[in-house]
Structure formats: C-alpha cells, structure tokens
Amino acid sequence: MTDCVFCSIVAGEVPATVVVSTDRVIAFRDIAPQAPVHVVVVPREHHTDVAALAATDPATLADLVEVANEVAEREADGEYRLVFNTGPDSGQSVFHAHGHVLAGRRMAWPPG
Ligand code: AMP
C-alpha cells in the first residue's frame, strides 16, 4: 500500500525502534509515547483496521495479541492496556491495523 507509514516501516523504508519481529507482525516504539511503555504492534500485511484484519486473517490477529502480551510481560510485568482505535472518531490516524500496548503507569478509566 503506498502512502502508508506502517507499510513503510514494515518495508524498512522508515526507521523505527523494533522490539519484536515475527513472520506475520512487527512491534515498534510509538513515536509519540503516551505511557512509559508505548509499543505499536502491526501486521506485516496491510489491513485498514482491526476489524478488517479479524475478518480476513484472524490467525495474524491472534499473533498480534500474543506479541502485545509478550512485550508487556517483558517490559511491564504483564499489566497493560491494548487499544485498537478503529475509525476516525475513535482517534485512528494511521489506517493500517495496529494495537497500542500502553503500560508502565496506572491507567485512567474511562479513557478520554
Ligand atoms: P492511531 O492514532 O490509533 O491510528 O495510532 C497511530 C500511532 O502511530 C500514533 O500513536 C502515532 O504516534 C504512531 N506513529 C505514527 N507514525 C509513526 C512512526 N513513524 N513511528 C512510530 N510511531 C508512529
């Protein structure tokens, strides 16, 4: 997909601090962290959002969640929030499916 920053990161064309890389997903540090641990986990293949990923490739969505948990186990004793912004009103700004792993501080509820 052209003009997709996460596709460019997957292709190695845009630099990122990658923390996990598998056949199907990669995880890298968010460029604008909202918590002490803020890692974005994305499928290597382009899907617009998590709903599209779930519909077409549920095995990769399962991998994504497993990698998110692995990051949190390693960096935050396994306590974390996993966020999938879906659609502009939710705050989604990059239209390549991704989960935010947020951890390392107490989270507020409801989210803003
Ligand atoms: P969302 O707003 O849910 O679509 O999340 C997109 C996230 O991607 C935001 O938290 C951005 O800070 C992050 N982001 C955008 N560009 C980059 C980049 N080049 N490297 C790392 N994170 C990025």
Image (spheres, rainbow, N blue to C red):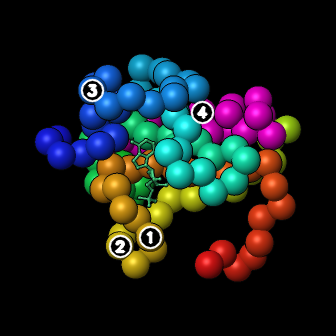
Measure how far apart labels 1 and 2 are at the Cα level.
Answer: 5 Å
**Do tag 1 and tag 2 residues touch (Cβ < 8 Å)?**
yes
**Mark 3 or mark 4, which is nearer the start of the sequence?**
3
Mark seen at residue 67? 4
How crowded pointer 3 is (Cα within 10 Å; few <14, some 14-19, many 20+) is rated as few
Task: Please give the name of the residue rendered at 52% of the width and 33% of the height, measured from the top-left corner.
Answer: 27
Tell me the residue that label 1 is attached to: 91
Q: Judging from the image, what secondary structure is the residue with disc 4 in?
A: helix
**Mark 1 or mark 4, which is nearer the start of the sequence?**
4
Q: Position of residue 38 (x, y in %)?
A: 63, 46
Tell me the residue that label 2 is attached to: 88
Nearest to viewer (mark 4 / mark 1): 1
Nearest to viewer (mark 2 / mark 4): 2
Q: Position of residue 37 (x, y in %)?
A: 69, 44
Q: Is residue 55 visible?
A: no
Amino acid type of the residue that numbered disc 4 sits on in the rendered structure: Val
**Do tag 3 and tag 1 residues touch (Cβ < 8 Å)?**
no
